[in-house]
Amino acid sequence: MLAVRHRRRVAGLVVLLGCAAAACLASIAIGSKPIPVGAVWHGLVSPTGSEDDLIVRSLRVPRTELAVLAGAALGIAGSLSQGHTRNPLADPGLLGVSSGAALAVVTGIFAFGVTSTYDHVWLACLGAIVATVGVFLLSSAGRTGPTPLTLALAGAAAAALMQGLVSAMVVADQQSMEIYRFWRIGAVSGRDPTVIAQVLPFLLVGAALAMANTAGLNALSLGEDVARSIGGHVLRARLIGVAAITLLTGGAVAACGPIGFVGLVVPHLARFVTGPDHRWLVPYAGLIGAVLVVAADTVGRLLAWPGELQVGIVLAMIGVPVFIAIVRRTRLAQL
Amino acid sequence: MKRPRLRAESLHVGYGETPVIEGLDLEVLDDAVTAVIGPNGSGKSTLLRAMGRLLAPRRGQVLLDGKRIDRMPTREVATLLGVLPQTPRAPDGLTVAELVAHGRHPHQAWYRRWSTDDDESVAAALRMTGMTDLAGRVLDQLSGGQRQRAWISMALAQGTELLLLDEPTTYLDLAHQVEVLELVRRLRTDLGRTVVMVLHDLNLAARYADRMVVLGDGSVVAQGAPHEVLTEDLLREVFDLEARVISDPVAGTPLVVPVSPRTRAH
């Protein structure tokens, strides 16, 4: 059984890497102007400045990169969120990260007239961090410190409050509404390519913290008392986890807007193969998240060809029925 | 005489405003199985959690090898003392072997990953609890007794001389309770471990413990060998129970036969 599970984990990793490569290739080839695979290769390896090369290098590749990064970040952040809250319905937005980002962006537009998307990214990252720090402090206020329950409650309360403030501002101001509406739908297209460079440091540090958190999270998954008795540092693990979730979700949301669903579902898909060991679960969730978002973004271009559907919409439309089917056939894990 | 490795000195522990343990002194006898008994709400679990460094005392101290346990590094404590809380919960899909491997956590660090030492400890722990054949099974598919043995294996793999078990027999039927307690006894006789366990069942406690500690209202009311401690007077005073104490026909330990709950004066 153990050897079987290990073989399955390794084999799954190979399959996933294959899927990721295929999805990226499709994402570069497919669009309002289809590009043959040969030309994609040409554009990637030895571009000569042809029209296809230009589309590949300046549009499709950055867009695919962004989808990979956002998907991986949200998948990893989702698996950490569910692990830390021991709640199978937790998603990265649970700690108030997404609504914090939204609030900061809208406040920037509404109160300070910030209109450049470059600045919106910084605002979103800042908002995400401030919101999570607030939620974490709020959840630590009690005698027990941050527990799965206080984290979830503080996050939900803070998210509701911040959503309310966002609504108040976008209702009051037409310009905020226009920009917010665009930002609100998660999309990897039409984003400035510099966005990637802007959020990449957040995502890299977040991913490194996430991997550093996996052993501690495994201990925590046995309950805080057991975690302590086997020598785990509960508060330290929680801090690292929350920092990782903030950086990953904040970076992804800042770049693409809140893409729902990925962070919630991907950890469950990963868990089918890996079981509850976070050392496998977290990297798996990253890979599956990347494949899912790239694939959904590509499918969105096919569904509405020659126009396109935003990745957030595709994920909701196709992903939710698929997820329900999976849940009905198997059983979601209790954490 | 050598001081016992684990002891509490004028210990005060509480939750929020409510004090649970007030001024408790306790020395845990080395190389023995100690059962902590007492009525509901007498602070048994709280005492165990405080002794195991899961709860910080308000005043007083818990000493492990002469050092204040709350000032020792978590990892160091975890190599000396294992605590198994009441009805611990594992995530779905965790196998017995994976659970037991968690017991090696205090022996690992980023520079020192899984070793043959760890493998041997896990295998020995599984052998001791008779769980070797079930190592690959998923925890949530096991019976209650098997699951409890798996958790005890994890605590064993940790390799600590001292083990604190909070009601290790909760939710088990009698046969499985006996099975778990036989295992606890072997931990002392075969491995020389010191065990402190909270138990509800007085008769099983009397049978399997070398020493009993009776808690009442947050302090130690009586302690000693089961036949010294478990008397009709004590049951009346501490448990509010009218009962006969006879000799267990099998083991010769005290056996409590309730007569009726004492009628309280209003």
Image (tube, helix red, strand yellow):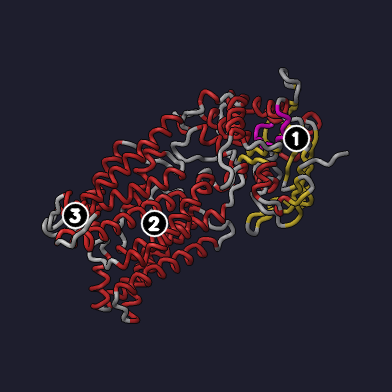
Disc 3/disc 1 C-alpha distance (Å): 70 Å
Give the magenta-colored segment's residue range. B191-202
Q: Which chain is indicated by disc 1? A: B
Q: Quadrant of the N terminus of chain B?
A: top right
Disc 3/disc 2 C-alpha distance (Å): 23 Å
Q: Is residue A155 magenta?
A: no
Residue found at x 67% / y 42%: B79
Q: Are marks 2 and 1 in contact (CB under 8 Å)?
A: no
Q: Position of residue B71 (x, y in %)?
A: 71, 54
* Residue type beneath disc 2: Pro
Q: Position of residue A8 (x, y in %)?
A: 38, 34
**Left or right: where A301 falls relative to A188:** left
**Left or right: where A267 falls relative to B123:** left
Q: Position of residue A260 (x, y in %)?
A: 31, 56
Give the label on residue A300, or none.
3
Q: Which chain is indicated by disc 2? A: A
* Residue type beneath disc 1: Met
Foreground pick, A257 / A211: A211
Q: Which chain is indicated by disc 3? A: A
In which image quadrant can residue B180 be found?
A: top right
* Discs 3/1, front: 3
* Residue type beneath disc 3: Gly
For label 3, the crowd category at 10 Å Cα-Cα, with few meaning under 14, some 14 to 19 and many 20 or more, is many
Give the label on residue B212, or none.
1
